[in-house]
Image: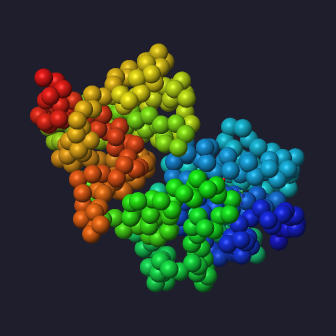
Amino acid sequence: MPKKVKVEYDLALINDSYKPYLEEMARVQIFYGGSSSGKSVFLAQRDVIDVMAGGRNILVCRQVARTLRGSVVQEINKIINEWGLRDLFDINKTDGTVTCKNGYQIVFAGLDDVEKLKSLTPAKGVFTDIRIEEATETDRADVKQLLKRQRGGSESTPKRLVMSFNPIFQTSWIFEEYFKAIGWADEQKEYRGDGLSILKTTYKDNRFLTSDDIYGLENEKDKYFYDVYTLGNWGILGHVIFTNWSVQDLSGMREQFTNHRNGLDFGYSSDPAALWAAHYDKMRKTIYIHDELYETGLTNDVLAERIKDKIGNQQVTADSAEPKSIDELRKYGVRANPAAKGKDSVLFGIQWLQQQSIVIDTHCVNAQNEFRQYHWKEDASGNALPVPVDKNNHLIDAGRYAHEQDAVSDGVRFVSSLYG
Ligand SMILES: Nc1ncnc2c1ncn2[C@@H]1O[C@H](COP(=O)(O)OP(=O)(O)O)[C@@H](O)[C@H]1O
Ligand SMILES: [Mg+2]
């Protein structure tokens, strides 16, 4: 049995609700609930503690490899630095791998990085822990495949699958597989049973939140977003706007994608910059979204590089509210043009998109999330109003810009005044 050492740290750094889970050993562990409830920080803290104690290697995953660096890699680094542990770890600058002086590791991988996953092994022993952030983005089959990688190793060290997420839709495989089976009710806070633990938390479980964060969550006006992100309840979507979309692996179709439609919505600190990269099959009225960009904190020079990586020198129609950013992107070699927008363009754009078939590539998880969640505002009695809830719609906005001209040629009314 691997030798374990006792790790000293200040318990006051850890939110109370999570403390009983520091040494939880259930095979499957679920940490879910509202946003900003401290899930990610706690799990990163526990990763650091466990690796230092020795005997455990942790594979931390998200669906899309690209999103790891800005989130979980950063969180784990932050804890190592803030806790004054930097001397105890080697940190690989390229892939983020954290190696403790005792030889145990925290390794990061995207579930979309199939090749990397195949060959991945820790320096010493096996991955005792597989931890998946934003696990609702994953497919059941991919996760089951991943669990096979935990075979072998010491029998006496329990293996764990740890998943964290916001409960954005009750039709998720995770709800089916783990919550239904035990008859979970939204009022419950935790479950600890045979091989399964579930902890539900909300912003109230996180005493490190700022009053601004709390204000935003408590004053959310939309019922769905309030349910999911403030209360942490499994989301049930009412008046969704798009049902005309499906998910498909488009990697084999790339060569047929020649009728490019690209759109860009700007964002920086809290909102992401969002790029919609699609092919339009006009005959069949089918849009193939084959790539997306969805990232915060990109200055325009970096954004330009990211866009060119994805669409080369194809045109992109961008939000005209930021002419300065459009000019800058052009300076950096992106063929960006402003969207015309115009009166009622949001509603007409949505209406046009509703009349198409939309196929989203499996790796475009943000597009999938937005299409799944985008919904109409409701009146006091729960009836839909002709106003979309202006939230989580960055890629959809980009999509409206991308197809603005298609809507024009289909004679959609709003543009007739603009284009004479
Ligand atoms: N133990 C902690 N110590 C310090 N700050 C924390 C702690 N837990 C959470 N926070 C703060 O709260 C924010 C939200 O927590 P996070 O773990 O990202 O929530 P979730 O993953 O549930 O959305 C973090 O960005 C951090 O600023
Ligand atoms: Mg989180």
Residue 188: x percent and y percent? 53, 80
Can residue 135 be seen from the camera position used here? no
Above or below for 304 versus 206: above
Q: Tell me how many marks there are.
A: 0
Residue at horizontal 47 percent and vertical 37 percent from the top: 267
Residue at 24% over, 65% down? 383
Which residue does the image show at 56% across and 36% down from the upper left?
Answer: 297
Placement of 196 over or under 281, stated as above or below: below
Quarter of the image for residue 37 reads: bottom right
239 lies left or right of 48: left
- On the image, the x and y values in percent for residue 213 come to 58, 55
The correct choice, above or below, for 63 with respect to 258 in the image is below
Which scheme is used to colour this image of the protein? Answer: rainbow
Determine the image quadrant of residue 330: top left
Q: Quadrant of the N terminus?
A: bottom right
Frontmost residue, 406 versus 105: 406
Q: Residue reaching furthest top?
A: 331
Q: Residue at x 24, y 61 (%)?
A: 384
Where residue 85 appears, as percent x and y from the top left, is 85, 51
Instruction: Judge from the rendering whether residue 127 lies leftward or rightward of residue 67; answer left or right.
Output: right
| Residue 390 seen from this side | yes
Return the residue nearer the eye: 320 or 362.
320
Please state, as top left, top right, bottom left or bottom right, where the C terminus lies in the image.
Answer: top left
Residue 406, image x, y percentages:
20, 33
